[in-house]
Amino acid sequence: MGRMLACANQKGGVGKTTTVVNLAAYLAGDGRRVLVVDLDPQGNATSGLGAGRAAAGASVYDALMGGVELGALIVPTETPGLSLVPSSIALAGAEVELAGVQQRERRLNRVIAAIQPDWDVVFIDCPPSLGLLTVNALTAADAVLIPMQCEYYALEGLSQLIATVHLVRDHLNPALAVQGVVLTMFDARTNLSAEVAAEVREHLGAAVFQAVVPRSVRLAEAPSHGRPIAAYAPESRGAIAYRALATELWGRLEHDAERADGERNEVAVPPGSPATPATPSTPDRSFALAVPQPPNRVVSGAGVPGGPA
Ligand SMILES: Nc1ncnc2c1ncn2[C@@H]1O[C@H](COP(=O)(O)OP(=O)(O)OP(=O)(O)O)[C@@H](O)[C@H]1O
Ligand SMILES: [Mg+2]
């Protein structure tokens, strides 16, 4: 069915890369053809997939700016079925260099369209900003996946991200959907995590994945070994969570594909037959996010080390 997912949140360190690397590895382990495009100059997905050294040469930058075919930049990873378009430090200049370029928001879309049919899922790992690289990712993608840390002010900044999604929908990519919100770094020892998770679910409803990623030392260690958690510590809690999240994500992707098929069939009804009401092509959960609520309910600090009792 071929879905392209941009993993985005302008907040830094919320688990974008960890989510991309580990979902990609589990889906590949299930036999899906999975590609990770590392669109972050930091190159964390590249090194997290063990491709740090190989990436010293060509990178996604060469496709965006240098006219190199994206397909020529794909490298295999240690995980069968999982390939990577690496990042490089050259990408750090891309935001500035793109600024003066025609159709600058569509550069990635133009180079990635040719290879999308070869993959079941393409993940684009975005940098922590809403700059041109992230806008390129949102313009190319079918949907956005939003990791959110179970921390104080979790919802802060979400409205800005959603506003950007709406701008991209209005001007660049009308079909852009919200695939869902992933709760990350859940700490079962604090009430705060549980309160934030409840708060986010209350605001965002079905957009939030059921599977919650716990804070796990194993997840933090895995990138330094250049391996997804599925290979590094498959029995760990973090592994179990990403395993479940991958299954849930695949279920959503299949559901969305069936839904899209249904819509196509409705459109194909011959003239003269009773009119069917138009159905939106974006999944329902997008609408849960359509009117982002400000984080006006303040969660208590109970359970936070050093916070109020
Ligand atoms: N569930 C987790 N438990 C513990 N540590 C985690 C977890 N998820 C991510 N980390 C660690 O937290 C840090 C930030 O995670 P990650 O790099 O995935 O976030 P990011 O949103 O991609 O960051 P950036 O905005 O810099 O790209 C990393 O050191 C990572 O190993
Ligand atoms: Mg990252």
Image (spheres, rainbow, N blue to C red):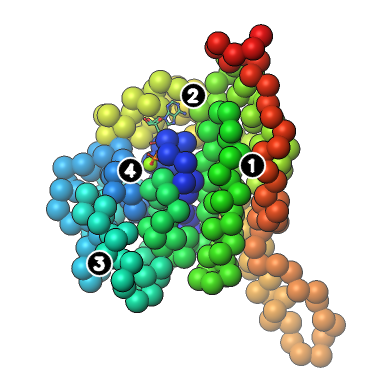
Which amino acid lies under the numbered mark 2 shown in the image of this protein? Arg
**Ligand 1 under 8 Å from disc 1 Cβ:** no
According to the picture, the residue beneath numbered tag 3 turns out to be 65
Rendered location of residue 273, percent (x, y): 82, 85
**Circle 3 — which element?**
helix
Is 15 positioned to the left or the right of 273 in the image?
left
Image point (53%, 33%), residue name: 149
Q: Are marks 2 and 3 in contact (CB under 8 Å)?
A: no
Residue pushed farthest bottom?
272
Ligand 1 closer than 8 Å to label 2 CB: yes
| CB atoms of marks 1 and 2 within 8 Å | no
Q: In this rendering, is residue 286 above or below 156?
A: below
Q: Nearer the viewer, residue 277 or 161?
A: 161
Closer to the chain start, of discs 4 and 1, is 4
- Identify which amino acid the numbered label 3 is placed on: Met
Q: Are marks 1 and 3 in contact (CB under 8 Å)?
A: no
- Residue 100, relative to residue 282: is it above or below? below
N-terminal of the pair, mark 1 or mark 2, is 1
Q: Helix, strand or loop at disc 4?
A: helix
Disc 3/disc 4 C-alpha distance (Å)? 20 Å
Q: Mark 2 sits on what residue?
A: 215
Residue under pointer 4:
45
The first of marks 2 and 3 along the sequence is 3
Q: Earlier in the sequence, mark 1 or mark 3?
A: 3
> Image point 16% across, 42% down: which residue?
53
Q: Is mark 4 within 8 Å of ligand 2?
A: yes
Quarter of the displayed picture in which ligand 1 can be seen: top left
Q: Which residue is mark 1?
A: 208
Q: Are marks 3 and 4 in contact (CB under 8 Å)?
A: no
Query: What is the C-alpha distance between the residues marked 1 and 2?
Result: 18 Å
